[in-house]
Amino acid sequence: MKLEQHHIDTFNTDQADAHARAFAFTAEKVPDIQYVLQRLQEFQVAIPSWALGTGGTRFGRFSGGGEPRSLEEKVEDVGLLHALNRASGAISLHIPWDIPENAPAIKALAAQHGLRFDAVNSNTFQDQPGQKLSYKFGSLHHTDKAVRKQAIAHNIEVVKYGIELGSNVLSLWLSDGSNFPGQLNFREAFLRTLESLQEIYAALPADWKLYIEYKSCEPNFYSTTIADWGQSLMLANKLGDKALTLVDLGHHLPNANIEQIVALLLMEGKLAGFHFNDSKYGDDDLTVGSINPYQLFLIFNELVEGMDARGMHHASDLGWMIDASHNVKDPLEDLLQSVEAIMIAYAQALLVDTKALAEARQANDVVTAQEILQEAYRTDVRPLVAQARLLNGGALQPVQLYRRLKIREALIKERGLKTVATGL
Ligand code: PSV
Ligand code: MN
C-alpha cells in the first residue's frame, strides 16, 4: 500500500488556517526560526524492522491484524510512516528476523519509498532453527570457543548483508550474562567478549562503525556482561575509533541520569547514538515521550549543546533509532507518536538560550538556569514540528490522517487479520 500525495495535500489544506495561526504564534518568539526549521526538516529517525508488528511479553501477544508478512511489507509500512511524517526515512534490520534474500530488489523498493538502510543488528540472544550450538549460556562471552566462533561468524554475516544494503553500521546487543552468583567469572567473561569483538571489529569495512549497546539486566538477572555505559565504553576504547557506545533509553537502572551519560560519551567522541523508547520500571519499550518527556528534552538539550561544541551535524553524525514494542497500540500509530515525541524534544532543545544559560551557570544562578531550560521545554513547539513536516511534503497531523484514511483497515484487508510479523 502506498499513500497518494494528494491525500496529504487535501488534508493539509483543510487544516491550513488553524496551523498558520498556531505557527505564527510560536515562530514569532523564536530568534532564528529558519535555522530551527532547517534542522527539523533534516532530522530523520530510523524505524526498527522488528517493531512493525504487535509486541508481546512472556505472558502473551495480541495481534492487531494487518501485520507485515515479509520484509517487503515492512519496508512498505515504514514507507507509509515516512510519507506521513517525512521524518522516518530509514529502516534498521534485525537479522535473522529479517534476512534480505534479494538485496538489490529490497534496496530498490526502499528507495521508491525514500528510505535508506540504517544500522544492521545481529541476534545471538536466541537460538535459530537448525543452529549448531546454543546461546543458552551466552554468545561472545561463552566459555566454549566454538560457540564464540559461531556468534562471531553470525556478526560478520550480518555485516555482509549490511554492505549489500548500503548500511555502514553493525549494532550489537548481547544478552550474555549470568543468572546466579558464582555462575561466571566476570573478568574472564569480559575478556572473552573483548576478544570476540576484536575479531568482529577486524572484519568491519573501513567506513563502518560498531555500536555496542549495554543493558543492566534481562534476560539475565544477576549480571550482564555489558551492563552499563562504562563497560561498553571500556570495550569501545579498547577496540578503536570505529567502536562506539549505543544508548538505549530503557537499559539503565532506575533513576539513572541518562543526560549526564550522554553528555560525557559525546564529549569523548564515543556516543554512537540511540535506541529511543520510554519506560517506567525497566526495559518497558513504551512509546517515546509517553512517560518522561522532560527527561527526553534534557537528553536532547545535552545532545544539541554537545554536538554543537564538537561541530557535529545533528542529523547525520549520530545514529537515531527507535527500539520499542507495542503491546496494545497499533504499531504504526505508536511509531508516529514516537517520532513526533523525538521531534518535539529536539525542537525544544533547539530553543534553549544557550548563551544566557552559560551566563547563569557561570554566576551560579540556579534559578535562572532552571527558568531557561523550562522556558524552552514549556514552549508548545508542535506547530514548528508540523511546519517542518509541511515543508517536507508530510501531513500536518500524521496520526489523524492515518486514521482518516483508514490505513490499518486497508492493511488488514490486504494482508489479513491473523498475520504475525517477525520480531520479539
Ligand atoms: C534488547 O533489549 C534490545 O534493546 C536490543 O537493542 C535488541 O536488539 C532489541 O532490544 C530487540 O528487541
Ligand atoms: Mn535496544
Image: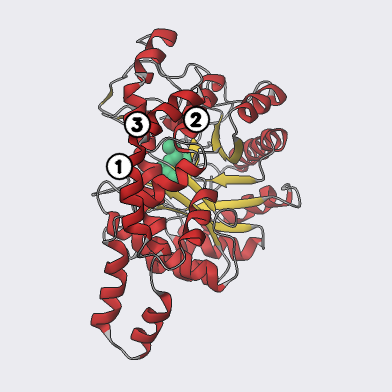
Residue drawn where x is 35% and y is 85% of the image: 361
Q: Which residue is mark 2?
A: 78
Element marked by disc 2: helix
Residue drawn where x is 40% and y is 82% of the image: 358
Instruction: Find out if the beta carbon at label 3 lies less than 8 Å from the nearest ligand 1 atom.
Output: no
Element marked by disc 1: helix
Q: Which residue is mark 1?
A: 18
Residue 340 x/y as whole percent:
37, 44
Up/down of 25 relative to 285, above or below:
below
Instruction: Find out if the beta carbon at label 1 lies less than 8 Å from the nearest ligand 2 atom.
Output: no
Distance between mark 3 and mark 1 Cα atoms: 9 Å
Residue 14 numbered tag: 3
* Nearer to us: label 2 or label 3: 3
Task: Evaluate whether residue 286 shows in this view.
Answer: no
Q: Is residue 211 left or right of residue 293?
A: right
Up/down of 164 relative to 346, above or below:
above
Distance between mark 2 and mark 1 Cα atoms: 28 Å
Name which residue type carries label 3.
Asp
Q: Are marks 2 and 3 in contact (CB under 8 Å)?
A: no
Q: Residues within 10 Å of mark 3 (few under 14, many from 20)?
A: few
Name which residue type carries label 1.
Ala
Name which residue type carries label 2.
Val
Task: Ligand 1: give its quadrant.
Answer: top left
Precedes in sequence: disc 2 or disc 1? 1
Residue 325 x/y as whole percent:
35, 35
Q: Are marks 2 and 1 in contact (CB under 8 Å)?
A: no
Q: Residues within 10 Å of mark 2 (few under 14, many from 20)?
A: many
| Outermost residue to the bottom | 363
Up/down of 177 relative to 61, above or below:
below
* Nearer to us: label 2 or label 1: 1
Precedes in sequence: disc 2 or disc 3? 3
